[in-house]
Image (tube, rainbow, N blue to C red):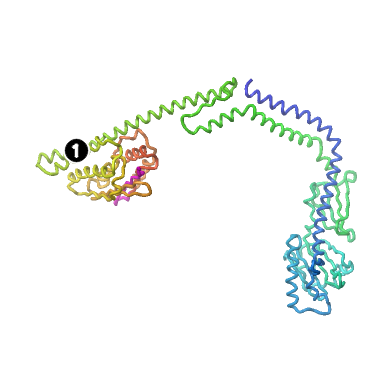
Amino acid sequence: MKFRTKIFLIFSILAIIPLMVLAGFSYIRYERTIYQQMDDISSQLFENATETANSTLNSIIDTTNFFNFYYHDGTRAIENLDLFMNPEQKPEIFEFYHASKSYDRICQNRMYSDENIYGIYLITPSGYVFSYTNEINGSIRKDFDFEGAAWYQRVKKLDGRLFISTVDAHEMFTGKKRSVFFSQYLKDVYTHETAGILVVDCNPAIFDLSSANTMPDITLLTIDNTETDDVLYTNYDEISCEFEESDRKVMRGSLRLSPLRLTAVVDYGSLFREFNVTIVLLLLISVVCIGGFLVTAYLVSRHMVKPLEDLSRQMRSQKAHPMEFFTQHMERNDEIGTLYNGYNTMVESLNASVKQDYHDKLVVLDAQMKSLEARINSHFLFNTLESINSMAELEENRQISTMSLALGNMFRYTLKTRSELVTVEEELGHVRDYVSIQQIRFDYRFRLEIRMEEEFRQQRVLKLILQPLVENALYHGLKYCSCGDTITVAGQLEEGLLTMDVRDNGQGIEEERLLELQQNLTKEASFTELGHRNKHSIGLTNIHSRIELYYGRGYGLSVTSRPGQWTNIRIKLPVLR
């Protein structure tokens, strides 16, 4: 059986059959439970709303009670306000200032614990008004007539019970924002003296029950004052349905602070429509589908896809040669077995190909390196021999001996050196032989300067890397001694690196040509480039390729120049221990 067929049968069995069984069972259970669920949801919503409202009221009650709170040492929060209880004796302004600091400390914690409180005010019998406000609704007007206010007289009659205002922009506050305030007559419980009237101004959102109303579109929540018939909160504007007398449920209950009452009206008609059979079945089908797909994914991963994961893991782990074979699942007769056999065949072929390619490159590299060692510029040999011949015909001269000796040394150094590595001093000797011939040829119109410490001269480097650069400086930089007269070879040790510079004070390199040279030097070393020169430079690319192939990436030549002034070629090599 094919792999695709196995997956199709598993998905069909695990998805279609359970969906059909659960769909029928869900339809039967739905009709029996829907009404009970609606009652439970409505009751829970009303309980949550009552709890939320009472929690808010408890916070207000705690704030008002705090000012009558007695500490363990017998003192209380408003102990230092006793000076202001006598309406016939008005304290000095500095006493009011001192008491205000204490009052601010008392109110600060209460304000920070409830962000819906705009301000807390204490109206004393002596006429002073202590206030602590967050400035959202301003403060109490200084010219406000408390005695003429109906609510003020109402608070006095309540004799210690909490007064609750309407939700309105009350004229006694300078902020003119809609708010609801709570007021209470404070008395000393021991002396029964009047301490003042406490006013707590609050944001109307303090009664907001939207967090407790999980069905805002079909549930009407209202908080009203049964004594004044004032509505402190309602979500009527948010209701999207119209309540019918026969399809609604009304629940009422008193709140923590009398005479406040909470009323909840739930539209059962809309709620029933939300719990219709289609939605319930769709939800159940979705849940079952998700569960079925999870189970299916697990089974597929466990019994069928796992071989593919093993093969993928093996392929990712192949980081070096030779590549390893994978022997699991080789005995299978389906597509998995075919895939594993094909993979092992591919690994075997790649290992053989890489081995052969590596061997071929080593052979080619060895042959090209030897060919490069034996290659000497034909034009240079021709010109040198012609010069020797001409001078020999004209007269016997010491220069002939010098040129012949230098030429012999160069042949010997190029062809008879036992190792690819030589000391810097030996490489400089090869450069001096070359320069001595060219100085005679060009009538000493240029000079060679060598700036290297003795320690540097004993370092070992790849041979035949300096003389081609000096030759390049003479021919292309000094332009046969027509554009400069000095070639400088310098070297230094820098953090485990050998740095050698071949510099001339000749014609320099134009910007476009310099960019082309720099780009050629950044290209990866190629075997076909070894041993070849072009008409623009004498082996710069070849020297760079030799160094890179011998030492590795990161070493080689770099070229800098300023047109009309100088050219500098830098060699960077590692220090060989």
Residue 417 within the segment the image draws in magenta:
no
Q: Quadrant of residue 206?
A: bottom right
User: Which quadrant would the N terminus be assigned to in this image?
Assistant: top right
Tell me if residue 507 can be seen.
Answer: no
Where's residue 516, x and y in %? 36, 43
Q: In this view of the protein, which residue sits in the foreground, 516 or 134?
A: 134
**SS majority, magenta:** strand
Relative placement, left or right, of 45 versus 97 is right
Q: Is residue 211 above or below residue 277?
A: below
Segment colored magenta: 561-577
Residue 530 image offset from top left, x and y in percent: 33, 35
568 is within the stretch colored magenta: yes
Using residue 346 as the reference point, say whether residue 336 is left or right of it. Answer: right
What is the three-letter code of the residue carrying label 1?
A: Gly
Give whichever of 440, 187 is nearer the camera: 187
User: What residue does disc 1 label?
Assistant: 408
Quadrant for the C terminus, please: top left
Mark yes or no: residue 307 visible: yes
Label 1: which secondary element: helix
Please state the horizontal and vertical placement of residue 276, each as a whole percent of the image. Answer: 81, 37
Closer to us: 363 or 153:
363
Residue 200 found in image quarter: bottom right
State the residue lying farthest toward the left. Answer: 395
Q: Position of residue 358 (x, y in %)?
A: 40, 30
Q: Is residue 398 above or below residue 285?
A: below
Count of marks, rendered view = 1
Give the residue drawn at x 84%, y 54%. 222
Residue drawn at point x = 89 percent, y = 61 percent:
228
Crowdedness near tag 1: few (<14), some (14–19) or many (≥20) residues, C-alpha within 10 Å? few
